[in-house]
Each structure stands twice: as structure tokens, then as C-alpha cells.
Image (tube, rainbow, N blue to C red):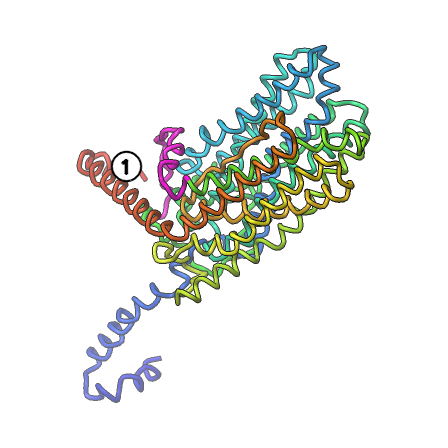
Amino acid sequence: MATAAAPQDTSPTSDSPAAASNESRESQPSDEEPPPTEEVEVEVYSLFNTPLHKLIIFTLLSLATLTSPLTATIYLPLLPLLSQHYAVSPQRINLTITIYIIFQALSPLLLSTPSDTLGRRPLFLLTFAIYTLASILLAIIRSNFAALLTLRALQSLGASAVLSVVYGTVSDVYVPSERGKVLGPVMAAANLGTAIGPLVGGWIALSSGSVWWVFWTLAIFGAFMLVSLGALLPETARNVVGNGGIKDKAWNRPLLDLNRWSRSRTPACSTIRTTTDGGRSTRSLKFRNPLMSIRIMAHPDTAIILWIVATFYALWYIVQASIPSVYRQHPYNFNEFQTGLAYLTGAAGVIICMYATGKAMDYNYRVIARRMNFPIDKVKGDDLSRFPIEKARGRGCTWLLLASLAVSVGYGWAIEKHAHVAVPLTLQLLMGFLATWILNCFNALLVDGFPQMPSTAATAGNMAIGRGWVFTLAGILTGVGGLVGVVVLNHKGLDWRNRRNKSISTGEESKVATSQEEHPQQDLMDTEKR
């Protein structure tokens, strides 16, 4: 091997002694040490980059996202039967829907922040454990109306926090240029659950002859998700495991190690600054203010995004809530089964959008990147502080918002004037498609601006003023309000986002410096313990 190395060093240093030659050979690797640190493998965005990892994570997230909306709407066909069983008025039984919606809003506020510090897996497992337990108790306790109210609240608490954790997981694993193809199908599952829930609930109750089998079905689904997440989902929170290179605590590792079947090509290292502790997990046990996520609404760009998301969620829920009253009355006179089928047209629009919006979002990202001469890095992830992500996510949304306005107004007046049944059903399909597209684009923008951002949802509005005017106002609210929001985000979004992130980064660095100055000895002891 010495003779093989000699020819490389003979031309410039042929008269150097052997020691110098050895020193030269030793110094050469040191000169070549920096290049490996510049290789893409070292600074890979996520080590969960194998096809098997991505397939399992994608499947689990899609099923998890389905949970809350499916649980909310699968319950709707049971309301008359439950009212008879508990011998209470329809108004009292409707309180169970109100309770569910209240906890649907509270649950992400209470449980999303701990997922950033403790990790995604503990929150997934906790929420599905709560959800499964509540579903089992709902199926068992059948004679107490107060128990029904309490357990529906508990069921909502477990199901509704899942969505915010899903957002964080997507941000952990996928670079911004690839998030569209993931968020499209994953987030569309939420709208799909809203659309198919009543049909599934009615079919289970009809085929089994008992409303309680609906709760048993939800309990089985919850138990399946609990086992699947515990066995397969790795911890992805970047504050805990970095890009996947930091070894997490044994209690928080999946039961089945996917790396045995699918080895990543990248080395087991992390580019996150928390890797200075020798490669161990840096999970923080300090609990932050659970209502801290409300503070993000003070940021102008986030407030606009939340406005668009919330109004389109409201529009979609209004459409879903209107279906029974629209089609059971004159002139359509649908029976219960036909009314359930009426939900499928909106579901069809959601399914079509699932496959279209993801690819379109990634395409829009590439188009804006080419215009900006911005190089896309699918390995390290892109620096969004230099990229107008608002323009990429909002590209084409102007026309979609105008179309949504027209479809919403058209739907309202079609059912007001008793148009042929094919007209409102077709408009439901278009509304499902357009609402899902808008929601996916701006939910992705939330992930890009706040990687651990909880989602915002709204419910149906007041139907007392007449269906035509309700959907006219809803169309104006979503269409015009959304148009204004897109224009403002395109012009000011990048500047607002950079100022906010700079302020957050400066605040975190100052807190770390202060903590190290006040407790240097404790930090040293903690390091020695690790």
C-alpha cells in the first residue's frame, strides 16, 4: 500500500523524506475532512426518508386525521334514536353536538404545545388512549344522559388534538417543496370524514339494529390506531430527536424498528443544534403555557391565514349540516338512505381534490422558485426566509376563491328555488373540491410559517334567514374575504414572517444564554448525568 501511495506524492515532493511523506498523507485527509461535512447526507433534513418510513408515516397520519371529523358526523344519524332511548327532547340531545364542538376547539389548545416539547408519539398515544376509553364507555353505559354528555366531551378531547400533532409531524419529516403532495391527501381525509361519517353511522346502526355498535366501531378503530402508532410510528419531533439522528428514550421508541427492513442511506447524525449532548434526546419536561398558541393570532400574516381557513371550514360545515333539511323536504323528499347518499357527492369532490391539490401545490412551489432563481434543496430543506412561500401556496387561489363564491351563491339559490336535484348535488361536488383545495393550500402555509401549528375549524351558521341568503353571505364571506387575504399575504407575508421568526429566534437565544449564566453548575451536572 506504501508503493501505491508513493506515486501520488512524488511529483511535487519527490525529494521529501519518508516522514514528510507520511505527514503529507496524514494532512491530506485533514484537508479533505470539510468536504464530507458539505455532502448532502450530513445535513439531510430528515432521516425518515426511506420509502418504507414515508409510506407508514403517510398512512398513519391519514388515518389519524380522519378520526375527529368521522367521530363528529358518524353520530348525526343516531340523534333521533338517542333522543327516544334517553327520553329527552331533540334540543337536549343536540347538546351532545355542542359539547363535542366545544372540546373540538379546546383540545388542540391544551394538547398541541406539549407535543413540541415532549414529542409527537406521547401525544398520539395519549389522545388515542383517551379516545378509545371514551368510545368503550359510550358503548357500555347506556342509561345515563349525563354520562353521554361527559363521554362525548372526553371522546372529542382525545380525537380533536390529533390534527395539530399531524401538522407537526408533516413539518418534521417533509421539506417545504414536498409537503404539498403529503398535506393534500392527509388533510383531505378530514373533509372526507365529514362527508362519509353520516353514511357510515347510518349503515352501522341499520345493519346492526343498535346505535351502540357505532360506538363499538369507534372503539375498535381507536384501539387499532393506538396499537399501530405504538408499534410503527417513530418519534419525529425535531426538538426531541433532531432530524432523526438523536437516539430517543427507550420508552418512546416504536415496538418495531423499521430500520431493520429499510436502512437509510444517510448517516445517523443530526443538524439540529440540540445534538451537542452526545447524541441523546433533549426532551424538555418544562410545560409551556397551553394557551400560547392563541398568541399567534396577533401576527398579521397568521391572522389572515386563520381567517381564510376558518371561513372555509365554516362554509363546508354549513353545507354538510344543510343536507338533511334540504333533501328530506319538498320537493326532493329523500328517505334516510337517499339522504345519506347525498353526502357522497361532496365526498367525491374531496377525493378528486386529494389527488389534484398535492401535485399542484408542489408544482406551484417549483414555478415560484424558478421565477426567483431559488434553488430547491430536497435534502437539506429550503431556507424559507429567502423565499416567498405565501406566493407559492396562494398561486391560483384568486380564481379558486372567485369560483367558490359563485358556487356557494349558486347552491344557496338552487335549493331556495327548488332546482332539479342534479343541480345542488353537482354544486356540492364542486364545493367539496374547492373548499378542500383552499384548505390544503393555507393549512400548508400554516405549517410553513409555524411548523407546529394547530388547525382552526368552525361550525355551521344560523339558517334562520333563508337558505339563499345564508349561502350568499357565506360565499361573500369566504370569497371576498379570502381574496383580500391572498393579496395582502402576497405583498406583505414574507416580510411579516421574517420579522416574526427573527423575534422568536432572538427571544429563544436570550433565554438560553440567561439560563446558562444563572445555572452553569446545574448544566454541567446534567451533562455529566447524561
Give percent across and percent down for residue 455: 49, 38
Magenta includes 302? yes
Horizontal side of 413 relative to 477 (left or right) equals right
Give percent across and percent down for residue 37: 33, 63
Check the image and report above or below for 10 versus 43: below
Q: Residue at x 43, y 39 (%)?
A: 249
Magenta includes 288? yes
Residue highlighted by disc 1: 526
269 or 64, which is in the foreground?
64
- Region of the chain picked out in magenta, as a range: 278-303
> Which quarter of the figure is the N terminus placed in?
bottom left
Q: Quadrant of residue 99?
A: top right
Q: Residue at x 76, y 33 (%)?
A: 327
Amino acid marked by disc 1: Asp
Q: Residue at x 30, y 71 (%)?
A: 32
Check the image and report above or below for 156 versus 441: above
